[in-house]
Amino acid sequence: MKTKIDRVLILTNAVNAANLKALEFQNNEDGGSCNFDSVVIKLEGWTRADIQKLTTLKIIGDKLSGRYWKGYRWLNTTIYGQGNKRTKMAETACNHLKECEYNVSMYYEMD
């Protein structure tokens, strides 16, 4: 059985890999609507303090509310831009974390 520290290190490595994949699109065009498209993550049994004590991952703010987003938190990933580039980078990071079997989703919001 993996310890909490083992699980956080595995998550950190997965997020770092997701960030590298997202960076492949940092030079994409950035037209389109200004947005706040972001990765959100649900980590059952973990508090933000738990993660911040053990890793450099940035879990932002309190848990999101509402029926669909309940229990999710913003995950600060490497995302540049404000339009199409931001969307592509966030989706790439999210897809990688899904492949690693984390409970992540995309939060889409247009300005």
Image: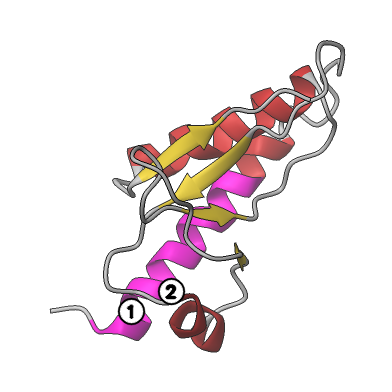
Work out which residue is located at the far front of the displayed protein and give it.
66
Tell me if mark 2 has few (under 14), some (14-19) or many (20+) residues whose alpha carbon lies within 10 angstroms of its own.
some
Mark 2: which secondary structure? helix
Q: Main secondary structure of the magenta part?
A: helix
- Tell me residue 16's x, y (percent): 58, 57
For the N terminus, the quadrant is bottom left
Q: Are marks 1 and 2 in contact (CB under 8 Å)?
A: yes
Quadrant where the C terminus is found in the figure: top right
| Crowd band around label 1 with a 10 angstrom C-alpha radius: few (<14), some (14–19), many (20+) | few
Q: Amino acid at mark 2?
A: Leu
28 lies above or below 98:
above
Residue ID at (50%, 33%): 106
* Quarter residue 37 falls in: top right
Q: Residue furthest left?
A: 1
| Count of marks, rendered view | 2
Q: Position of residue 32 (x, y in %)?
A: 82, 11
Bounds of the magenta segment: 3-19
Q: Which residue is mark 1?
A: 6
Seen at 71% across and 48% down, the residue is 78
- Marks 1 and 2 sit apart, C-alpha to C-alpha, by 5 Å
Residue 101 falls within the magenta-colored stretch = no
Q: Residue at x 62, y 67 (%)?
A: 58
Say which residue appears at 74% left-offset and 41% top-offset.
Answer: 79
In the image, residue 18 sits, relative to residue 9, either above or below, namely above
| Left or right: where 30 falls relative to 63 | right
The residue at which mark 2 appears reads as 9
Check the image and tell me how it is coloured: secondary structure
Q: Position of residue 49 (x, y in %)?
A: 50, 83
- Describe the element under mark 1 as helix, strand or loop: helix
Per the rendering, the mark at residue 68 is: none
Q: Is residue 106 above or below residue 65?
A: above
